[in-house]
Amino acid sequence: MMRPIKQPGTARDPEATGLVCRACGCRQFRVIYLKRLPGALMRRRECRNCGKRITTRETGG
Ligand SMILES: [Zn+2]
């Protein structure tokens, strides 16, 4: 069975983006920073569990 883990362009809910904290493995992120770029959207997220911060970049929005 081929089941895609990532579903690009679907929901904005962190639970559905396939985003997993590499430090603790949880999926609870909150957005702490948002920046618009030409043709892209940058989001800085912070893990609610351990506080690790990651940056995601979304295009096509
Ligand atoms: Zn974490």
Image (tube, rainbow, N blue to C red):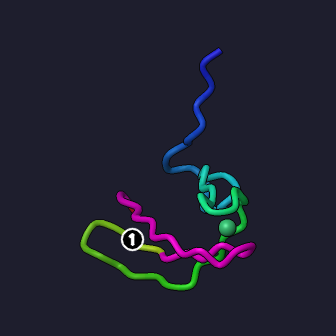
Q: Which of the 4 image quarters holds residue 30?
A: bottom right
Q: Please name the amino acid that badge 1 sits on.
A: Leu
Q: Is most of the magenta stretch helix, strand or loop?
A: strand
Magenta residue check for 34: no
Q: From which residue to which does the magenta span run?
A: 44-60
The crowd level at tag 1 (other Cα within 10 Å; few <14, some 14-19, many 20+) is some
Where residue 55 appears, as percent x and y from the top left, is 45, 70
Where residue 46 appears, as percent x and y from the top left, is 60, 77
Kindly give the residue lying farthest to the bottom in the view shown: 33
User: 46 left or right of 49?
Assistant: left
Where residue 24 appears, as percent x and y from the top left, is 69, 62
Disc 1 element: strand
Q: Nearer the viewer, residue 44 or 58?
A: 44
Q: Which of the 4 image quarters holds residue 14?
A: bottom right
Q: Nearer the viewer, residue 9 or 14?
A: 14
User: 34 left or right of 47?
Assistant: left
Kindly give the residue lying farthest to the front in the view shown: 23
Where residue 18 appears, as percent x and y from the top left, is 61, 49
Q: Nearer the viewer, residue 8 or 51?
A: 51
Q: Residue at x 50, y 70 (%)?
A: 54
Q: Which of the 4 image quarters holds residue 11?
A: bottom right
Of the 4 image quadrants, the one containing the N terminus is top right
Of the 4 image quadrants, the one containing the C terminus is bottom left
In the displayed structure, 42 sits above or below 26; it is: below
Magenta residue check for 52: yes
Label 1 belongs to which residue?
41
Q: Residue at x 70, y 74 (%)?
A: 50
